[in-house]
């Protein structure tokens, strides 16, 4: 049953939303999570790779939501040269539809309520112009639900922040336009993540192959929207599949967008708090946003709970500070680096992979790859200097 | 300045509802539900950002405007369908 009033309404039941719900509900607050789709965790618009250490902060790795465990990462250049390096710790490829369910279950175990097929189409506002709840379409019925705070976890397509007066538009040159297929019937090394680079392969981005158990994998592409105005992500992906896996059985196809930007400057305004993709809490180089979004969700959930319990909404400003201190500053550096990496031509990646392949595998590391990159292209130093200036 | 005629067109039934276009729309001019997408005509400025961002190739730009376009396209599709049977 939906109540008339909650302490917190969270729009979106992805990892950021349900993590915020979990940490706020843990403090005893009444929390409602509204998800526009009929399922939590589906459709999966995600490459699904996370690090072991990242995951461990929130949930014990469990084989029911882990499709593969990976210990190696391979970079492949346009001419097929490659370099394999071990992953520090280890990485997982998740089953997001089960993983997201688990996170929602944790949130509800803590006391939060989750409702699916609930589309939020506007904010309720009080006389001061602050958000005081949401207007939602639930089972074809328009209803108004009041709350003290609204947390916007509504993803790349976020609009809640805009209704509160925050400009959440992702700059066109920061939006990675993505397409992914989940395939079977072809041979993969199950323990390895593959990344293909190069302007001809994926301008301003990369192609990923993330294994999901034996002979199954997510093969996806992210391209910079601004570098590929005339050709879409799905066309690049189709070309890649035709060249490398013409006989693969395609089990699903999915589109997506990743805001590879710096975090939105205003995370809190008029009783609305942004988390996850909606806040652009995404690693701007890798495009990874599961763990970063959960970290944002945890911080927001805790801070909002404290602000409500102490009845002092000035406390909300602690959330952007916490985010900046832990990840925000780092994402700013990554964002500057992304621009330089995006400018490298195919020859750069070919030479880099060629040089790296001459290093014995046991000696390969990210640091070694970086030193080799520096050797090949001393101008990286200038780009790096830009990052720190 | 008078409002331009709408030139952005989303092919019905082809969209994957991923929200990439909504993320880059500076005018909050796209309404996206679980399996429905609509351009809010009064807000759209035909800036084309959604066309560039779409990973799925389903958002089109029509210089002459999209008024009656859906009718024309539907008629076209029906013709093609008619030819196949």
Image: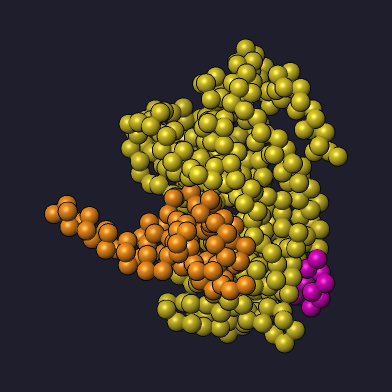
Which residue appears farthest toward the bottom when viewing the image? Answer: A127
Residue sitting at x 42%, y 77%: A139
Q: Is residue A312 above or below residue B22?
A: below
**Residue A259 at what x, y percent from top left?**
62, 51
**Residue A128 at what x, y percent from top left?**
75, 84
Letter of the chain in yellow: A
Q: Toward the viewer: A356 or A186? A: A356
Span colored in magenta = A307-317
Count of numbered tags: 0
Q: Which quarter of the figure has residue A160?
A: bottom right
Question: Is residue A376 visible from the viewing direction of this image?
Answer: yes
Residue A314 in magenta stretch: yes
* In this picture, residue A231 sits left or right of residue A389: left
Letter of the chain in orange: B
Q: Which quarter of the figure has residue A367?
A: top right
Query: Which secondary structure type mostly characterizes the magenta part of the structure?
Result: helix
Q: Toward the viewer: B29 or A191? A: B29
Residue sitting at x 48%, y 77%: A137
Which residue appears farthest toward the right when viewing the image? Answer: A389
Residue sitting at x 62%, y 28%: A345
Residue A383 in magenta stretch: no
**Residue A60 at what x, y percent from top left?**
59, 48
- Quadrant into which the N terminus of chain B falls: bottom right
């Amino acid at each position: 049953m939906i109540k008339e009033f909650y302490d917190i309404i969270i729009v979106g039941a992805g990892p950021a939303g349900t993590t915020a719900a979990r940490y706020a509900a843990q403090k005893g607050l009444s929390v409602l999570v509204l998800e526009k789709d009929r399922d939590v965790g589906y459709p999966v618009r995600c490459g699904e790779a996370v690090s072991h250490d990242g995951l461990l902060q929130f949930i014990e790795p469990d084989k029911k939501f882990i499709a593969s465990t990976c210990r190696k990462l391979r970079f492949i250049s346009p001419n097929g040269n490659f370099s394999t390096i071990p992953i520090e710790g280890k990485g997982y490829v998740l089953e997001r539809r089960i993983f997201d369910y688990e996170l929602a279950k944790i949130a509800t175990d803590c006391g939060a309520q989750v409702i699916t097929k609930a589309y939020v189409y506007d904010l309720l506002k009080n006389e001061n112009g602050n958000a005081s709840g949401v207007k939602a379409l639930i089972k074809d019925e328009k209803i108004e639900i009041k709350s003290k705070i609204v947390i916007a976890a509504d993803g790349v397509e976020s609009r809640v922040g805009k209704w509160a007066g925050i400009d959440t538009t992702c700059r066109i040159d920061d939006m990675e336009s993505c397409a992914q297929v989940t395939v079977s019937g072809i041979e993969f090394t199950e323990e390895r993540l593959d990344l293909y680079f190069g302007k001809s392969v994926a301008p301003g981005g990369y192609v990923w192959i993330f294994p999901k158990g034996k002979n199954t994998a997510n093969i996806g592409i992210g391209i910079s929207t601004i570098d590929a105005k005339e050709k879409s992500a799905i066309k690049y992906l189709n070309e890649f599949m035709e060249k490398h896996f013409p006989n693969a059985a395609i089990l699903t196809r999915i589109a997506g967008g990743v805001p590879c930007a710096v975090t939105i400057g205003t995370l809190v305004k008029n009783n609305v708090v942004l988390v996850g993709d909606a806040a652009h809490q995404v690693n701007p180089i890798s495009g990874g946003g599961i763990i970063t979004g959960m970290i944002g969700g945890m911080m927001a959930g805790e801070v909002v709970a404290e602000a409500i319990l102490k009845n002092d909404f000035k406390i909300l400003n602690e959330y952007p500070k916490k985010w900046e201190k832990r990840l925000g500053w780092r994402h700013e550096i990554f964002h500057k680096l992304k621009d330089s990496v995006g400018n490298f031509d195919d020859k750069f990646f070919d030479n880099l992979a060629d040089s790296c392949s001459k290093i014995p595998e046991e000696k390969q590391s990210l640091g070694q790859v970086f030193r080799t990159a520096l050797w090949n292209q001393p101008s990286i130093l200038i780009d790096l200097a830009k990052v720190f200036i | 300045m008078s409002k331009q005629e709408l030139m952005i067109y989303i092919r019905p039934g082809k969209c994957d509802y991923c929200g990439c276009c909504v993320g880059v729309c500076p005018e909050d001019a796209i309404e996206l539900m679980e399996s429905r997408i609509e351009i809010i005509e009064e807000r759209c400025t035909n800036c084309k950002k959604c066309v560039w961002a779409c990973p799925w190739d389903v958002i089109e730009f029509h210089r002459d405007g999209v008024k009656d376009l859906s009718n024309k396209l539907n008629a076209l599709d029906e013709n093609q369908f008619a030819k196949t049977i």
